[in-house]
Amino acid sequence: MFGHLPRARLATLPTPLERGPELPGGVRLWMKRDDLTGLGMGGNKARKLEFLCGAAIAQGARSLVTVGAAQSNHCRMTAAAGAVLGLEVHLVLSGDEPHAATGNQLLSRLFGAQLHFTGAEESHWGELEIARESLTDELTEAGAAPYAIPIGGSTATGAAGYAHALAELLDQCDAVGVQPAAIVHTTSSGGTHAGLVAGRAILAARGRAVPEIVAVGVAKGVNMGMPDVADLAADTVELLGGDRSLVDRADVHLDPNWIGDDYAVPTRAGDAAIHWAARHGGWVLDRVYSGKGFAGLVGNAESGRWPAGSNVVFIHTGGMPSLFAPGGAPPER
Ligand SMILES: Cc1ncc(COP(=O)(O)O)c(C=O)c1O
């Protein structure tokens, strides 16, 4: 669809597109099940890792180094990718080593990754990236040939996975005769968002009808301050062989109203969204990412952003393992 970047096949694709119930405000919900990408219990990072690991292997890397919050899904999925591809994996994490690993950490260890605890605060992303850079230098000196992946895998190479995902999703919408008004998803490091914006720009230039992309932010320091999504989208278009001027800043929609106090601090709206999704579709959302993202979709639907009767797709980006970490489960109702 978009050129021939090196790609490691890691995800089970296409992921299902499920028809959901009507939302408050009369909008028809569709759920794109990227929580079912397969790799290491699934989630959005499988799509990015296909291209990141493709690049790593093409460069002759023998190890992967990446970074994230203590319960990072991205780190857990990188650990799984390394296991599949026979690459050693090092994960630089916030916080201190717990007495017993839970949730994503438990899985990362199970997949054979080495966990490096920095003691850093949960969302001190800059400090974590510095630790990732110095570990990468040490591994290079030790001859481990590392391929370094920044937080969330949000480079143009990683984002290419979501340009492809948009094409996959629009084909599925065509197959069921639905033209979505919007595609909504959770954003933190911005790579998923940038990839979707890039795919949208390329497909629109080819004459395809494209919906608006609405990204619901869950991390202040990352999605507000990191490389600008429009720039990353333009880099991604260029990497995929297109003209970077195809990306229009006006097409980047970031809704910052659902973060609450901070990254990984639960919100009432997020918890309510988790319960709603569980009871209406058997979908499992989490308190850090997809619960807040889905709360944003419901909130926008309630306030009439899309006309009654229109179709809106939520890309379920995963996050289920953190439900089984301390504080990960919403209060029962
Ligand atoms: C479950 C889940 N949803 C959404 C995101 C956000 O994706 P991105 O970092 O590409 O913005 C993440 C990132 O870690 C995630 O783990």
Image (tube, rainbow, N blue to C red):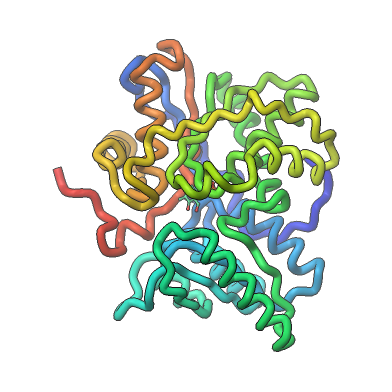
Which residue: 31% across, 57% down? Answer: 323
Q: Quadrant of residue 148?
A: bottom right
Which residue: 74% across, 38% down? Answer: 234
Q: Nearer the viewer, residue 30 or 299?
A: 299
Instruction: Please indicate, yes or no, whether residue 1 appears anywhere in the rendered image.
Output: no
7 to the left or right of 42: right
Q: Which residue occupies the extreme bottom position in the image?
A: 142
Quadrant showing the N terminus = top right
Q: Does 153 appear above or below 305?
A: below
Q: Position of residue 215 (x, y in %)?
A: 51, 35
Q: Nearer the viewer, residue 225 or 215?
A: 225
Q: Which residue occupies the extreme left position in the image?
A: 333
Q: Does 312 appear above or below 142?
A: above
The number of numbered badges drawn on the structure is: 0
Q: Does 258 appear above or below 175?
A: below
Q: Nearer the viewer, residue 51 or 280?
A: 51
Instruction: Please indicate, yes or no, whether residue 82 appears anywhere in the rendered image.
Output: yes
Quadrant showing the C terminus = top left
Q: Nearer the viewer, residue 19 or 311?
A: 311
Q: Does 328 appear above or below 76?
A: above
237 to the left or right of 119: right
Which residue: 28% across, 36% down? Answer: 269
Which residue: 40% across, 18% down? Answer: 27
Q: Quadrant of residue 278?
A: top left
Q: Position of residue 232 (x, y in %)?
A: 69, 43
Q: Position of residue 210 (x, y in %)?
A: 65, 22
Q: Position of residue 69 (x, y in %)?
A: 45, 62
